[in-house]
Every structure is written in C-alpha cells, then in structure tokens.
Amino acid sequence: MNVDSIQELSSLLQSSISPVVLISGIGLLLLSMTNRIGRVIDRVRQLTDENKLDNPLKNKQIENLYKRAKNLRSGIILMIGSVLMASLIIITLFVSQLYRLPITIIIVLEFFLCLVSLIASLLLYIKDIGLTLKALDYKIDVR
C-alpha cells in the first residue's frame, strides 16, 4: 500500500464524496420510479379483475399501462446501472490512489457512462409522465 500520509487519504475521501452524493440522489429518483411502477401494476390488476374485459376503452388503458410499465422497468434498470457506475468510480479512485495507477481515463469513462445512463433513465421517466396524461385522456373520454 502506497498511501503515504493522512493528507493523501483525506484528499481521496473528498474525491469520493461526489459519487456518493450522486448515488444518494439517484436513490431518491429510484424510489419514485419504483412507486410509480407499483401503482401501474396495481392498476392493471384492478382492470383485469373486473368482469368487462371486452371493453375497448379498458383494453386501451391496459395497453397504455403496459407501455408505462416497460418504460419504467427500463428506466429503473438504467438508474441501477448509473448507481453501479458511480460505485465503480469510487472503487477506481481508491485503487488508482493506492497503487499509483494512471487510470484517469477510466474514471472519466465511468463518470460519462453514469451520467448517460442517468439521463436516459430520466428521459424514460418523462415519457412515463406523457403516457400518464394519455391515460387520463382515455378516462375523460368515458364521461
């Protein structure tokens, strides 16, 4: 182990704080997305348990909910990938400092992949909100 001083270790820990904060923020977004997918699944179960399955409006609603569930699942997977990348950043920072490895490009690449994954997940989240409004349109057509 080549960590020579408390100052170097302190600097390393400070560098690791940003990815940890990123993980914390993503965790809150992940909580929101998992709550949304749970509500979608509950709504599909509610619609399919009702007796009138041949209702075209109900079929449109179920189709819309299925699209939402697929988008949310993809978004959740991308967010988990983002958390994994942020975790790899922390590990890579420690390994590069401990063994004095010049792997800055790997850290930059991991950070880039982390943010790309997060952005893609957020775009799917926005798409889910649009599909939610489409489902509301179906509901208004009933009245």
Image (cartoon, rainbow, N blue to C red):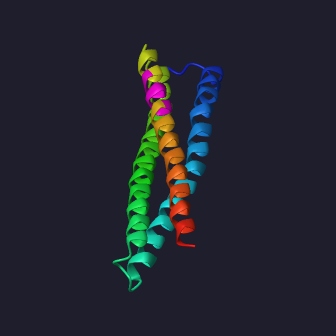
Place of residue 130 in the rendered image (x, y in percent of width and height, measured from the top left): 53, 50
Q: Is residue 122 magenta?
A: no
Of the pair 21 and 131, the residue shown nearer to us: 131
Which residue is nearer to you in this view: 62 or 56?
Answer: 56
Determine the residue located farthest toward the left in the rendered image.
54
> Which residue is most to the top?
102
| 69 with respect to 126 (left or right) | left
Q: Residue at x 47, y 72 (%)?
A: 42
Residue occupying image coordinates x 46% and y 16%: 104
Residue at 43% x, 43% y: name it: 78
Who's the residue at 41% across and 21% down the image? 106
Which residue is outermost to the bottom?
Answer: 51
Residue 19 relative to residue 65: left or right: right
What range is drawn magenta here?
Answer: 109-115
Residue 14 position (above or below residue 79): above
Seen in the picture, residue 46 relative to 102 is either above or below; the reply is below
User: Looking at the image, which is closer to me, 32 or 58?
Assistant: 58
From the top left corner, tell me how far across and down residue 143 is, in percent. 58, 73
Query: Chief secondary structure of the magenta span?
Result: helix
Determine whether, in the image, residue 95 is placed left or right of residue 126: left
Location of residue 62 with respect to 108 vertically, above or below: below
Please state the horizontal and vertical placement of residue 60, each as a whole percent of the image: 40, 65
Coordinates of residue 139 in the picture (x, y in percent): 54, 68
- Is 31 placed left or right of 37 in the picture? right
- Whether residue 1 appears in this view of the structure is no
- Which quadrant of the figure has residue 65? bottom left
